[in-house]
Image (cartoon, rainbow, N blue to C red):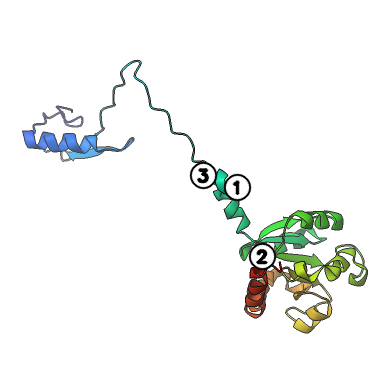
Amino acid sequence: MINNCPLCRVALTYTERQLEKIDEALKALKPGKHLTIKCPQCKKGIKLFAPEKKTVPGEAVAPPGPPNLEWLKTGRFEDEEKVEDVPMALVLHPDPAGREKVKAAMESVGYLVVIVGTVREAIEQMRFINFACITFHAEFEGGVLADSVFHDYMRRMAMERRRYIFYILLGPQFHSLYDLEALAHSANLVVAEKDIDHFDLVLRKAIPDYEELFGTILEELGSYGKR
């Protein structure tokens, strides 16, 4: 406790009760915090810090307890559950700029996006990850959609798996949100390339409509082990 104001040097006098209150306040301070009192003479604030706790040489410091290993019993841990709750999306797009726009749009609606550079890589990823959404550019393989290996792979996919994937076709030949065109190409959604700057808005319109139409059915199928 200081006896003089460090600014005006006037002697500081306190009653016994005031000293007790100041002492209690200093003891309650958190590390790095300070207490401010006002000098009765110059009216300026005086900062007081709690005295450092003295440690006795050789005094034992209690180590932290062992970690909680309850997750070993279930085989799952908290971070794993958080990751698995995030829907995954796969993007196949030939143009880097367009690819980034698609990625940003999909992330804005909550997807964790995986980008691949080849059809082989895409199919390999699908062996290990249950993607909730796949966006495929019709010119990704350099030819027409009818000759696409990946599109043919999606069309031939077993319905037990395909029904859980929101498959989006992107390209200059499509008309955004045209359901009949999507149906004709075995997709859930088609998006015109000219609308790629508004891809996030298209997703916000199409995905809720899809979930409203099929969400209950897919949930029922999942509960009966059809997934």
Q: Position of residue 36 (x, y in %)?
A: 22, 39
Instruction: Characterize the local packing of mark 2: few (<14), some (14-19) or many (20 or more) Cα atoms within 10 angstroms.
Output: many
Please name the amino acid that badge 3 sits on. Answer: Glu
Q: Are marks 3 and 2 in contact (CB under 8 Å)?
A: no
Tell me, for residue 75, which label it has, or none. 1
Q: Earlier in the sequence, mark 1 or mark 3?
A: 3
Circle 2 — which element?
Answer: helix
Q: Position of residue 39 (x, y in %)?
A: 15, 37
In this picture, residue 49 sits left or right of residue 106:
left
Circle 1 — which element?
Answer: loop
- Gap between marks 3 and 2, in whole Å? 38 Å
Q: Nearer the viewer, mark 3 or mark 2?
A: 3
Q: Earlier in the sequence, mark 2 or mark 1?
A: 1
Tell me, for residue 150, which label it has, or none. none
Front-lying residue, 6 or 76: 76
Please name the amino acid that badge 2 sits on. Answer: Ala
* Residue topped by disc 3: 70
Identity of the residue furthest to the bottom in this view? 180
Q: Quadrant of residue 126?
A: bottom right
Q: Position of residue 116 (x, y in %)?
A: 79, 55
* Residue topped by disc 2: 105
- In the rendered view of the protein, which quadrant contains the N terminus? top left
Q: Residue at x 8, y 31 (%)?
A: 13
